[in-house]
């Protein structure tokens, strides 16, 4: 059982000024997940008649990408290859002080407390993160085009991105390159996506720039902090795809 | 008295869907532009329906309570999606998938719907591949398959343990494309709080903007509810924290019948619970049962020794282990359907053979598979006389490539390495087969109100087979609803836009506001979670994996009691017009408290055992579920009359023309 | 329409130009270093050799053209890097973290390219003012071979302790800048392959240690020996 000091960013809404506030929680089991620890805090706040801390979360099994906390100076906390909901309290020690902050980026404005607006990612996807195929019972048979296993596996690895935004949060420039590159790579690697690859990469990068994300300076922080360990090779592929597209289109 | 008309088309089962499509009304492309459709929910069914409807020309409004449509809980589905492609040349066919699904559902599903599902299943795979969904492939570049419980063929397509994610992102990208063209208008962080009926037809919804807290009106010519299941009535389940019944329940209260609420799937392979603080349970894909063997110790002393930490499971010799599924069900072994596997685990644990501190866990062991695969790889790599360590190493790599992310997830949660020590698993609430009653067109008993995916009751009977939820969600959204909705909308080509200024919208909005105000002004002393946990405990203990009349009657009284206390003593902080997650939860739990009662009532009034619904009074001598086809071969569709205890039962008789009704056997 | 402005305005275009100018400057550094190394010869040979080298560098037409490309590259690399990228990137995060452990996910040099680059730019200004400007715009003494005696100016400069120290520190800064910049330039151009990237990385690290070190040895050598 642990007793902890929490320093949490509180902000009433997008327009208000926020600040760090200090809370204490006691008797935290090391088997709890980080979010369950926050549940304990919120239960405590509600019982005291106070406003609970707002944070995004949903599936609590590391796949929906909703949870998004900057914990002790790192997105999704100190552990690697996991999301906040998979972070367990056994990572911390009795008496620790834990800083909990929202993702910080101009493109991700705070909605309340630790909740940020990540619809910029949706808009990037809308600008080209798809294959333009209508629903039809008559597309070609799924096995008509064999896809080399390596390409399929690499496409899958890129496609595992959960859109949580940890890459943006970790990047000192709040760049969204890893997110964009994951989708561009997935579709550039598959024959189905190759038809539109040039328009896709141009449009997605244009939208990314419009949203106000910073520029990639190849620090590699995004990939290290990515819960799905999306590789920097994807960013290189994006750079390549974009260069070819802008030279020829 | 009953107005249940399933509208099942005539003709031989294999021709019903084609005939039906040929004969229903169609809206011409120019007129589709004048018709609005609301789709609530952005999971597999919702996103695929929204995308497909928009592609056809309808103006679609899609709503999701999450911050992005990509977060719908379909994303968490792990194992795979079934399709009768017969790529493995193992004799699969539309009929076999149909048969397996009806049998797996313990003969409580509507034949015609299931056949259609099997029929369109192959199209789903084609569609998803065309969208760029990266399914697993073999070395020749063709699609790979795995096996799932309750079937004798390999028909499950997968993308590691993230199939749901990949399929959802496919549907999400299809919808994103339509958002880009303006044909879909997306409303993130909006929660539907009521359905608006005008002249008896569903003509819109009242939704709360979860950021501003404003109550907003949206009109349309039809409303599609693709809002998922209600497993969270148990508080602890594998559902996402936000998964809820509110949209479906509000439609139910407006006249949509709720079918088979008691059919709940308890998934056999979940990570066991560890303490009272637990907020949710985590599923370990059923695909693990392809390679994992389930066991508990044969001797109670050994089980106790393991529980007390005096013995390690790896040290227990083979002959002292009880591979109880292989023992009881030699034909299907570890791949029996979920309900059977879950009950068998409960039976062993109740008998005192559980292996963790709570006594509620069994082992899922990969040692045999690691050795088998390791040997296979060694042969392929021409390693002569490989050492045991080498084989283990090679085998672990194969297992990692198949289930790597699941093993990693397990280790993160439990702090135990499943390559070294067997996984511990226990059943948990996972999926609800019950849902809004729909006809063959997926329309509820409210004209113009449709239900798709897990939100409806239609295809899985009393138990769903693994990898069939994804199939059903996408079948409904891509290939069924876009056709069948035209039959209703064809009458609306001259209706014009639906005004949200009508008295009906006004009245419904007022009710919603009053409901929220009363929750906020209650100023009680207990949090919403406090009541939700109590409800969950009653549901799990008395309406869970096995049920009896006495327990169910107690549950009915206790749920009522909790509901009354909830309205007296709940405390909801914050205000209506702000971002207020507690208020969201309060509304959802209020609806769960009503649904829970109907759920228990439904279970009580079905004294037979079938699929996921196990009544202790109705079992064979060997403890297997015993159906009563003479008296209970029907769908229970409940009509809201103002209080769950007074809900009125309507029966849709199930007739089986193409499958012989048999007692299920997986022995 | 996206395509038309893509090579000029997009975030990636700025990076391509950074990368190309950066790699060009890396190439230049080798040529520059080759000339400078003549300073390490015996005092008697070093003077004529170095003066011949400076004369060649300022009169050979191809080199002259390259020199304009070089000035442009330096200015572009600095303006694009400091004024545009670094400023834009700061704007992309208006509120900073109260607790940030960036050292756990990236190396220090990679996060401080703007600062390192600014220091290098100041150094280049100083460097050019002292040598290039003097050579071009002032009268300087001739050596016995009737070439402008740059060697004399160089030796005189590095006999100042503080001046040598500035050079040595600047070369350390350059080393850090290159440590990240070299590899990064290839990544930006899309060259990242699990087979070849380790080679690029190895060459980059070798380059970023050896080249600045050799540059730094020269002033130290002059300071200590002459």
Image (spheres, helix red, strand yellow):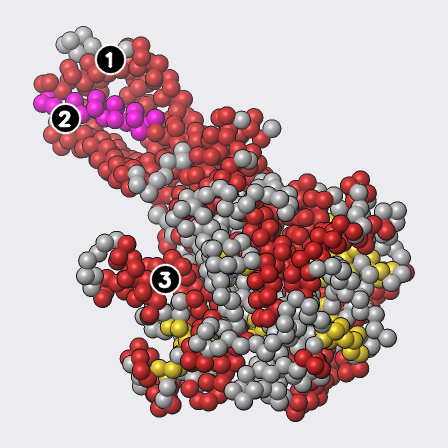
Q: Residues within 10 Å of mark 1 (few under 14, many from 20)?
A: few
Q: Confirm or deny contact between disc 1 and disc 3 (CB under 8 A).
A: no
Task: Using the rendered image of the protein, determine whether residue B473 is visible from the camera's viewpoint.
Answer: no
Q: Which residue bears the numbered disc 2?
A: C40
Whether residue B661 sits left or right of residue C222 in the image: it is: right
Please, is residue A112 above or below residue A176 in the view? Answer: below
Magenta residues, dominant SS class: helix
Magenta segment, which residues? C24-43
Could you tell me residue B548's position as x and y percent?
63, 88
Please, is residue A230 above or below residue A93 in the view? Answer: above
Q: Residues under labels 1 and 2: Cα distance?
A: 19 Å
User: C52 or B329: nearer the eye?
Assistant: B329
User: B36 or C206: nearer the eye?
Assistant: B36
The subunit carrying tag 1 is C
User: C52 or B270: nearer the eye?
Assistant: B270
Q: Which quadrant would the N terminus of chain B be assigned to in this image?
A: bottom right
Task: Using the rendered image of the protein, determine whether residue C51 is visible from the camera's viewpoint.
Answer: yes
Q: Which residue bears the numbered disc 3?
A: B399
Secondary structure at badge 1 equals helix
Please, is residue B25 above or below residue B13 in the view? Answer: above
Q: Residues within 10 Å of mark 3 (few under 14, many from 20)?
A: many
Front label number (3 vs 2): 3
Tell whether position B495 is magenta.
no
Tell whether position C37 is magenta.
yes
The subunit carrying tag 2 is C
Q: Which residue bears the numbered disc 1?
A: C56
Q: Residue at x 35, y 40 (%)?
A: C193
Q: Residues under labels 1 and 3: Cα distance?
A: 66 Å
């Amino acid at each position: 059982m642990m007793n902890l000091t929490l320093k949490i960013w509180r902000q009433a809404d997008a327009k208000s000024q926020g600040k760090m506030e200090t809370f204490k929680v006691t008797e935290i089991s090391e088997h709890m997940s980080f979010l369950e620890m926050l549940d304990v805090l919120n239960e405590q706040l509600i019982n005291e008649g106070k406003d609970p801390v707002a944070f995004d979360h949903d599936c609590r099994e590391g796949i929906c990408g909703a949870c998004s906390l900057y914990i002790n100076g790192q997105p999704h906390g100190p552990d690697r290859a996991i999301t906040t909901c998979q972070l367990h309290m056994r990572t911390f020690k009795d008496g620790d002080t834990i800083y909990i902050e929202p993702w910080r980026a101009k493109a991700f404005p705070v909605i309340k407390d630790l909740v940020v607006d990540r619809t910029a990612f949706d808009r990037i996807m809308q600008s080209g993160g798809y294959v333009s195929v209508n629903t039809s019972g008559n597309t070609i048979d799924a096995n008509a085009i064999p896809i080399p296993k390596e390409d399929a596996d690499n496409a899958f690895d890129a496609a595992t991105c959960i859109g949580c935004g940890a890459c943006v949060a970790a990047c000192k420039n709040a760049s969204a390159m890893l997110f964009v590159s994951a989708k561009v790579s997935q579709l550039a690697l598959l024959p189905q996506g190759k038809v539109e690859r040039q328009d896709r990469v141009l449009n997605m990068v244009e939208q990314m720039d419009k949203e106000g994300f910073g520029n990639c300076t190849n620090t590699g922080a995004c990939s290290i902090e990515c819960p799905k360990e999306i590789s920097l090779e994807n960013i290189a592929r994006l750079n390549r795809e974009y260069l070819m597209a802008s030279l020829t289109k | 008295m009953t107005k249940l008309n399933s509208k099942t088309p005539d003709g031989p089962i294999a021709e019903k869907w084609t005939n039906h499509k040929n004969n229903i009304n169609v809206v011409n492309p120019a007129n589709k532009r004048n018709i609005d459709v609301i789709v609530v929910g952005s999971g597999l069914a919702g996103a695929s329906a929204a995308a497909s409807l928009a592609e056809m020309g309808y103006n679609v409004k899609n709503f999701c309570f999450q911050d992005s449509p990509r977060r719908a809980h379909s994303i968490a589905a792990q194992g795979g999606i079934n399709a009768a492609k017969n790529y493995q040349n193992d004799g699969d066919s539309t009929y076999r998938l149909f048969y397996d699904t009806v049998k797996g559902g313990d003969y409580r599903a509507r034949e015609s719907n299931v056949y259609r599902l099997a029929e369109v299943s192959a199209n789903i795979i084609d569609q998803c591949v065309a969208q760029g969904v990266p399914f697993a492939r073999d070395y020749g570049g063709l699609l790979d398959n795995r096996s799932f419980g309750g079937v004798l063929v390999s028909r499950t397509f997968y993308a590691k343990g993230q199939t749901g994610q990949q399929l959802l992102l496919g549907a999400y990208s299809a919808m994103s494309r339509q958002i880009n063209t303006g044909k879909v208008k997306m409303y993130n962080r909006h929660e539907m709080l009521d359905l608006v009926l005008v002249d008896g037809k569903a003509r819109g919804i009242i939704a709360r903007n979860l950021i501003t807290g404003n109550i907003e009106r949206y009109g349309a010519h039809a409303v599609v509810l693709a809002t998922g299941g209600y497993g969270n009535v148990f508080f602890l389940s594998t559902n996402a924290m936000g998964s809820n019944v509110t949209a479906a329940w509000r439609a139910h209260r407006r006249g949509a019948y709720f079918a088979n609420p008691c059919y709940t799937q308890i998934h056999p392979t979940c990570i066991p619970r560890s303490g009272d603080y637990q907020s949710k349970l985590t599923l370990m894909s059923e695909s693990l049962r392809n390679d994992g063997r389930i066991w508990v110790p044969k001797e109670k002393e050994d089980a106790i020794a393991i529980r007390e930490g005096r013995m390690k499971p790896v040290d227990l010799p083979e002959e002292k282990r009880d591979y109880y599924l292989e023992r009881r069900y030699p034909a299907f072994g570890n791949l029996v359907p979920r309900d059977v596997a879950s009950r068998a685990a409960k039976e062993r644990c109740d008998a005192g053979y559980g292996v963790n501190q709570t006594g509620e866990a069994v082992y899922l062991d990969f040692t045999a598979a690691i050795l088998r695969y390791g040997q296979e790889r060694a042969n392929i790599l021409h390693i002569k006389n490989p050492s045991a360590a080498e084989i283990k190493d090679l085998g672990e790599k194969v297992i990692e490539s198949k289930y790597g992310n699941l093993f990693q997830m397990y280790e993160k949660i439990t702090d135990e390495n499943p390559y070294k020590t067997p996984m511990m698993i226990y059943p948990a609430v996972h999926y609800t087969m019950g849902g809004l009653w729909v006809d063959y067109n997926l329309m509820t008993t409210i004209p113009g109100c449709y239900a798709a995916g897990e939100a409806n009751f239609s295809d899985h009977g009393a138990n769903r087979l693994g990898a069939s939820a994804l199939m059903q969600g996408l079948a409904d959204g891509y290939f069924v609803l876009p056709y069948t909705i035209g039959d209703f909308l064809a009458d609306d080509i001259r209706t014009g836009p639906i005004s949200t200024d009508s008295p009906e919208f006004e009245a419904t909005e007022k009710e919603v506001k009053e409901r929220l105000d009363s929750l906020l002004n209650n100023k009680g002393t207990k949090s919403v979670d406090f009541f939700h946990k109590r409800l969950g405990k009653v549901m799990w203990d008395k309406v869970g994996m096995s049920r009896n009349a006495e327990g169910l009657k107690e549950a009915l009284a206790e749920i009522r009691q909790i509901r009354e206390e909830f309205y007296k003593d709940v405390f909801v902080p914050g205000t209506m017009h702000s971002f207020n997650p507690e208020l969201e939860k309060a509304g959802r739990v209020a609806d769960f408290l009503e649904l829970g009662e109907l759920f228990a009532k439904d279970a009580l009034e079905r004294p037979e055992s079938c699929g996921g619904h196990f009544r202790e009074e109705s079992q064979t001598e060997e403890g297997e579920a015993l159906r009563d086809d003479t008296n209970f071969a029907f769908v229970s569709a409940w009509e809201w009359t103002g209080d769950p205890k007074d809900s009125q039962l309507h029966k849709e008789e199930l007739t089986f023309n193409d499958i012989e009704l048999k007692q299920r056997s997986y022995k | 329409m996206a395509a038309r402005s893509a090579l000029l305005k997009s975030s990636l275009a700025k990076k391509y130009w950074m990368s190309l100018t950066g790699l060009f400057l890396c190439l230049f550094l080798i040529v520059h270093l080759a000339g400078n190394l003549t300073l390490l010869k015996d005092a008697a040979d070093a003077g004529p050799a170095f003066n011949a080298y400076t004369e060649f560098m300022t009169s050979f037409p191809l080199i002259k053209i390259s020199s304009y490309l070089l000035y442009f590259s330096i200015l572009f690399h600095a303006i694009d890097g400091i004024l545009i990228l670094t400023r834009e990137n700061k704007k992309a995060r208006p509120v900073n973290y109260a607790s940030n452990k960036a050292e756990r996910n990236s190396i220090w040099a990679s996060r401080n390219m703007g600062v390192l680059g600014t220091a290098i730019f100041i150094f280049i200004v100083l460097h050019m003012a002292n040598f290039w400007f003097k050579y071009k715009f002032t009268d300087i003494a001739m050596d016995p071979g009737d070439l402008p005696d740059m060697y004399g100016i160089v030796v005189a400069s590095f006999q100042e302790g503080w001046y040598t120290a500035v050079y040595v520190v600047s070369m350390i800064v350059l080393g850090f800048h290159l440590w990240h910049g070299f590899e990064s330039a290839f990544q930006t151009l899309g060259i990242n392959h699990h087979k070849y990237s380790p080679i690029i990385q190895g060459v980059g690290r070798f380059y970023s240690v050896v080249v600045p070190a050799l540059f730094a040895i020269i002033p130290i050598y002059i300071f200590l020996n002459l």
